[in-house]
Image (spheres, helix red, strand yellow):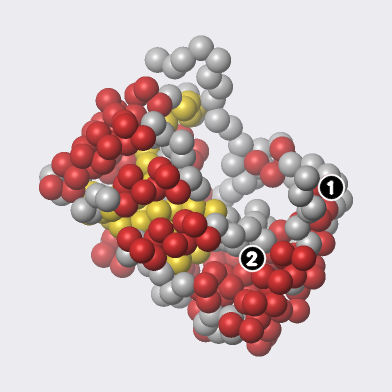
Amino acid sequence: MTQPGQKPFGAGWGKTDDGESVRAIHAALDAGVTLFDTAASYGAGHSERILGEALKGRRDQAVIATKFGHLVNEADQTVYPDDTQILANVRSDVENSLRRLGTDWIDIYQLHQAAYDPELAVELRAVLEELVRAGKIRWYGWSTDQVDRAEIFAEGEHCTSIQFKLNALLDNPQMRRLCADAELAGIIRDPLHRGMLTGKFTSATTFPKDDIRSRTDYGSEQIVRELETAEALHELLRAGGRSMAQGALAYIWALDPHLIPIPGFKSVAQVRENAGAMQFGPLEPEAVAQIQAIVADRQPMQG
C-alpha cells in the first residue's frame, strides 16, 4: 500500500535498447570495468534484469552494487517511495533483487532513500548485518548526500561505501572526509553532471519527455551558469588528449583514489569512451587546483 499524496516515479534517460545495453556491459567487462551500479527502482526492476542477463557466465568478473528502499511493482512498471515499508520489506526486497539479477549474492546493497529516519536507520543497519551473515549480501552502503545519515551506516561492521553526488562542478568535502576517516569507498553519482561535463549540451538543448533531464530548463540562469563553467573547464579537462568526459572522471580520481565514479551509459561507444579514461589516470594536482579555482570564482554571490 502507498500513502496519500504519493506519486509513482517515472522517467529515465530516454529510449534504450536492451541488446545494446547487454553489449555495452560486455564491452565494459572487456575493458577492465568491474563495478556495476543499478537499483531495484530503475525501470521497476528492468535494469537489474538486464544486468543479470549480461553477467551470465561472467558473474565472477563483476562487483554488483544495487539499491533498495522503494515499492517496486514489476507488473505495473511503477515505483513508489514509502519510508514506512523499508524495514518491513528489506528481506523480501533482497530476494527480489537476487532473482532479477540471477545471482546468489549481492556485493554491495545500498539504501536508496537519502533522508531516511536516523533511528530507523540504526535498526536497518542491524538487519543488513543479518543479511551479510546469511550470505545474501557481502557489504552494504547508503546512497545519500547527507553526511549525518551516512555516519550512521559508517559505524556498521560491513558498511563499505557511501554513494553521493560529486563532480568537477559540485563538491561534497564533508562526505569525502567522512569516507576517508571511516575508510569507506565513495561511489560517485553523477560524475558528468547529467552530461554537462561532456561538452555536448548548450542552453538550447532539449530532451524527450522520457528523459529525466526534460524536467530541467537548460535556458535557466542556474543551468546557463553551469554550462558556461563547464565550457571554462574545457581545456583543463581535455589535458593530455582526453575527452571532456574522460577528464571529468580523471578529476574525481585525482581527489582521492578511493572515489569510484559511476558514469551512466546507453551504448557501447559511451562505455568505451568512459573506460578509455583509465589509460590516462588521474589529473595532475595543478589542473585540479585550477579547476577548483575557476568553479569557486563562478559561484553565485550569496546574500
Which labelled disc corresponds to residue 221? 1
Q: What is the x, y in percent for residue 87?
A: 29, 29
Residue type at mark 1 is Glu
In the image, 257 versus 66, the foreground residue is: 257
Against 86, residue 165 (above or below) is below
Q: What is the x, y in percent for residue 245?
A: 64, 69
Q: CA distance from mark 2 to mark 1?
A: 19 Å
Against 212, residue 35 (above or below) is below
Q: Residue at x 37, y 22 (%)?
A: 84
Residue type at mark 2 is Ala
- Splitting the image into 4 quarters, where does residue 59 fall? bottom left
Can residue 110 be seen from the camera position used here? no
Q: Is residue 222 left or right of residue 275?
A: right
Identify the image quadrant of the C terminus: top right
Q: Earlier in the sequence, mark 2 or mark 1?
A: 2
Write down the residue under mark 2: 168
Can residue 255 be seen from the camera position used here? yes
Q: Mark 1: few, some, or many residues within 10 Å (few <14, many ≥20)?
A: few
Label 2: state its secondary structure. loop
Label 1: state its secondary structure. helix
Which labelled disc corresponds to residue 180? none
Q: Is residue 43 left or right of residue 68?
A: right
Against 155, residue 246 (above or below) is below
Identify the image quadrant of the N terminus: top left
Q: Residue at x 48, y 26 (%)?
A: 80
Q: Residue at x 63, y 58 (%)?
A: 170
In the image, 31 versus 23, the foreground residue is: 31
Q: Mark 2: few, some, or many residues within 10 Å (few <14, many ≥20)?
A: many
> Residue lying farthest top?
4
